[in-house]
């Protein structure tokens, strides 16, 4: 190529010095224009191709650094450099720089990567350009990893023993825990479990227990209107738990390991406790939802819940039942009926959603259309799962919910 350039220069020089008239200088000028066009086509085309590869390598490097979870700037830089070197074949000829900018709008942080190199030209040296500088720049937002609090309100009434449905429920719930927690590596995710039957078994503090009962570890709903609210006990017995009107025995729930699990990031411990649970008694969905809200509420009777800050924490309650509400609940008229319990459930769901808690409901092998409607209205559009397929329907529902929550934990801006 260098020999060709020298020959071209010689030809042009002789043409311009020729005494053959004015045509040869014009011809020489035309030759220069033509070869200038060739130079642009060859050298600039080659430069475009190299810059495209340079930009793609820089893009890959920045993205790989940005998506690291809770990483230091040094860790991000090392990842970006390694990815750039792996993706740009001529990395030795390039200069790669990297930085993190934590002062973006809306408190958004960015990674910034720049790659430059000099590309030797082939024809442009004829016109004084022996090299072209190539530059690729990229600015990528660092996803904010939000916290997540997920409470599983799970039906453990006797009907869940049919066809080993409770075993499939446990398998699906464990899959959800693994999905959201990234197999236990993401400690930002916390989980709580509220197994319910005709009542709920939980270790309540003394100030939350009615003074007119002997608390054995189980409770049904509070008196109205507190059983449809988040309100913490305020000193009156009606605002406290511990009352049981069911003839069921709390020790049976203890033997079935149906104890409430407060919020924790000990995912293995949560999974172990879920696995140990077995069905017992009848169905009080409203009581399960009431305690479920208390577990995830920063104002409730359990510790570990964060304040209601949806920009920083995703809060989720998943309510599952395979049957109708059969246990009665207290109403404003101071009587217990199933209708009151269903009304309380609706009010609880409305209250949770008003606090930006994402409520998902699942009807598992549920044939009663009235209860399906109740659960559907509780969750809202797109968050009720009708898991009719006993074998795979529940796993499909929990998988979808788990993936949604996991993906929602990553946010690019507030």
Image: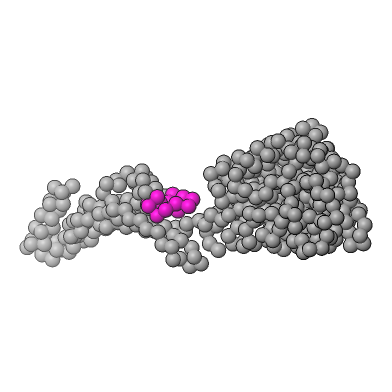
Q: Mark yes or no: residue 391 visible.
A: yes
Question: Vertically, is 233 above or below 265?
Answer: below
Question: Vertically, is 154 above or below 238?
Answer: above
Residue 165 x %, y %? 77, 35
Q: How many marks?
A: 0
Q: Which residues are magenta?
A: 64-77
Whether residue 215 sits left or right of residue 309 in the image: it is: right
Question: Vertically, is 168 above or below 243?
Answer: above
User: Which residue is found at the position 25% from the left and 54% from the top?
Assistant: 118
Q: Mark yes or no: residue 372 visible.
A: no
Front residue of 199/23: it is: 199
User: Which residue is found at the position 82% from the left and 56% from the top?
Assistant: 211
Residue 280 x %, y %? 81, 38
69 falls in the magenta region: yes
Whether residue 316 sits left or right of residue 46 in the image: it is: right
Front residue of 188/58: it is: 188
Residue 154 sits in which quadrant? top right
Residue 200 x %, y %? 79, 47
User: Which residue is found at the position 87% from the left and 53% from the top?
Assistant: 329
User: Which residue is found at the position 78% from the left and 55% from the top?
Assistant: 209
213 falls in the magenta region: no
Front residue of 219/341: it is: 219
Q: Please identify the quadrant where the C terminus is shown.
A: bottom right
Residue 341 x %, y %? 86, 54
């Amino acid at each position: 190529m260098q020999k060709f350039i020298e020959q071209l220069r010689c030809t042009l020089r002789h043409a311009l010095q020729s005494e053959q008239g004015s045509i040869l200088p014009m011809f020489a000028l035309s030759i220069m224009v033509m070869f200038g066009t060739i130079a642009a086509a060859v050298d600039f085309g080659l430069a475009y191709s190299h810059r495209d590869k340079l930009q793609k390598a820089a893009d890959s490097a920045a993205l790989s650094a940005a998506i690291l979870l809770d990483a230091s700037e040094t860790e991000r830089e090392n990842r970006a450099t390694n990815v750039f070197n792996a993706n740009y074949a001529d990395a030795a000829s390039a200069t790669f720089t990297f930085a993190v900018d934590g002062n973006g709008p809306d408190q958004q942080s960015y990674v910034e990567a720049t790659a430059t190199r000099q590309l030797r030209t082939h024809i442009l040296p004829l016109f004084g350009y022996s090299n072209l500088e190539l530059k690729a720049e990229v600015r990528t937002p660092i996803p904010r990893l939000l916290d997540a609090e997920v409470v599983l309100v799970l039906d453990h009434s006797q009907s869940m023993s049919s066809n080993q449905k409770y075993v499939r429920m446990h398998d699906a719930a464990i899959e959800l825990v693994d999905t959201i927690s990234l197999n236990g590596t993401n400690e930002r995710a916390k989980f709580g479990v509220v197994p319910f039957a005709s009542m709920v078994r939980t270790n309540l503090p003394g100030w939350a227990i009615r003074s007119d009962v002997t608390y054995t570890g189980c409770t049904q709903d509070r008196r109205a209107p507190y059983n449809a609210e988040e309100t913490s006990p305020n000193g009156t017995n009606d605002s406290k738990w511990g009352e049981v009107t069911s003839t069921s025995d709390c020790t049976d729930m203890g033997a079935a390991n149906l104890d409430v699990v407060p919020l924790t990031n000990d995912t293995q411990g949560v999974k172990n406790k879920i696995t140990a649970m077995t069905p017992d008694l009848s169905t009080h969905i409203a009581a399960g939802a009431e305690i479920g809200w208390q577990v995830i509420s920063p104002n409730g009777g359990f510790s570990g819940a964060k304040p209601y800050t949806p920009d920083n924490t995703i809060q989720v309650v998943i309510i599952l039942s395979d049957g109708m509400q059969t246990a009665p609940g207290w109403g404003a008229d101071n009587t217990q009926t199933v209708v009151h319990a269903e009304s309380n459930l609706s009010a609880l769901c409305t209250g949770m959603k008003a606090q930006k808690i994402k409520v998902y409901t699942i009807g598992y092998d549920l044939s009663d259309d009235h209860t399906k409607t109740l659960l559907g209205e509780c969750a809202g559009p797109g968050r009720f799962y009708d898991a009719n397929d006993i074998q795979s329907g529940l796993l499909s529902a929990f998988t979808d919910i788990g993936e949604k929550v996991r993906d929602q934990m990553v946010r690019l801006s507030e």
